[in-house]
Image (cartoon, rainbow, N blue to C red):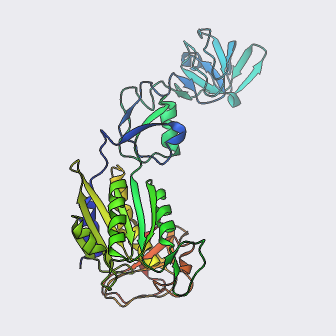
Amino acid sequence: MLSAQEAETLILNLVQPLDAQQDWEQVSLTAANGRILAAPVTGNQDFPYWDNSAMDGYAVRYADLVDCSPEKPITLEIIEEIPAGMQPQKTVQTGQASRILTGAMLPQGADTIVMQEETQREGDRVTLFAVPKPQAFVRHRGQFYQAGNPLLAAGIRLAAADIAVLATAQCPQVPVYRRPKVAILSTGDELVTPDQPLQPGQIVDSNQYALAVLVEVTGAEPILLGSVPDQPDQIKQAIRQAINSADMVLSSGGVSVGDYDYVDRILAELGAEIHLRAVAVKPGKPLTVATFSTTNQATQLYFGLPGNPVSALVTFWRFVQPALRKLSGLASDWPPMFVQGRTTQDLRSDGKRESYLWGQVRLVQGEFQFQLAGGAQNSGNLINLAQINGLAVLPIGTTQISAGDSVQILWLQT
């Protein structure tokens, strides 16, 4: 049985990311949020596009200001007004100035902006009372970016600021990786859908819905295949359908050592190579990780998650989500985000496996704090998972972390 870190390393080494040459598509800027850039972007425009003003004021020649002071102000002739979006029509000569607004193009001849608060205007004349530094408040063409240089690297997840950069660079269409397809199925005779009336002994298949949301939040496309009874032939048919329709498969249930746990046996019958059957974590010990070789020489990853809903979610956050990030084409930052914080309550485990306790993470006066979810920390208690955003980690051999002590937290960024 591998440790959590060993299992994470094994899984990430098995993942083959989408092919940047084949698995990409063009999308519009309005559809690019959250997508993974499939190719580097290079702009063909300098930015700023031209010299422009960072202030409302007057565009002047610095040489005209050398003798200016509050005691000895100078007066210049205003030759035109330049709002943002208008091309200047006149060249600033000695003794002249152009009224200019923020973002407007700098006129020929001018090299410095005097902010309007340091001036007094009367008609077509402006009096200056202070001398700024040379080239003050001028944003020069190409100051922030020169055309032809790399703009955005492949493998990043696009967010609002990145899309603003692409829009500025006049890239209305963006090459992104296609969304990986993830098939999701559940096994168990006891499972029903939320709209079905419960019969004695039955439970609702919550895993389908929770896993679908987590897959979608991670940037992939969930394919819901529903629940399958504990019948080997039906499970085999469902798994065969899943591997033929998706880039990754998630099943929940059927991976422990019970009489009706058929998944590992069926995977072997279908030609899978099983790399992992259990991890030293709690909750979530039974975890099957297998691979199928596809017709194009790629490796397809299969996760057999525990059927227990809490265990299924914890194993997704800890092991599946990193793999899905790598599969999607993301260049880095695949592993979970761990932060160090302090617990507000005593945390306990039996110390036999790396244990995860769920609750709320908050940033208080610059420090992360962890508060346990109310109710029993029991893998059968799905209810108190509501609104959690972190898992406190108790390493193997640690049976208690006292209130106020430091604790490692898996911060759930979903």
- Compared to 213, does 205 lie above or below? below
- Compared to 400, does 22 lie above or below? above
User: For residue 10, which quarter of the picture?
Assistant: bottom left
The image shows residue 269 at horizontal and vertical percentages of 22, 69
Question: Quick check: can you spot residue 339?
Answer: no
Q: Nearer the viewer, residue 352 or 145?
A: 352
State left or right for residue 306 relative to residue 169: left
Question: Quick check: can you spot residue 144?
Answer: yes
The image shows residue 272 at horizontal and vertical percentages of 23, 65
State left or right for residue 168 relative to residue 127: left
Picture residue at 37% right of the left edge, 40% below the top: 24
The image shows residue 320 at horizontal and vertical percentages of 36, 65
State left or right for residue 332 relative to residue 380: left
| Quadrant the N terminus occupies | bottom left
Picture residue at 35% right of the left edge, 70% below the top: 235
Picture residue at 29% right of the left edge, 44% below the top: 19
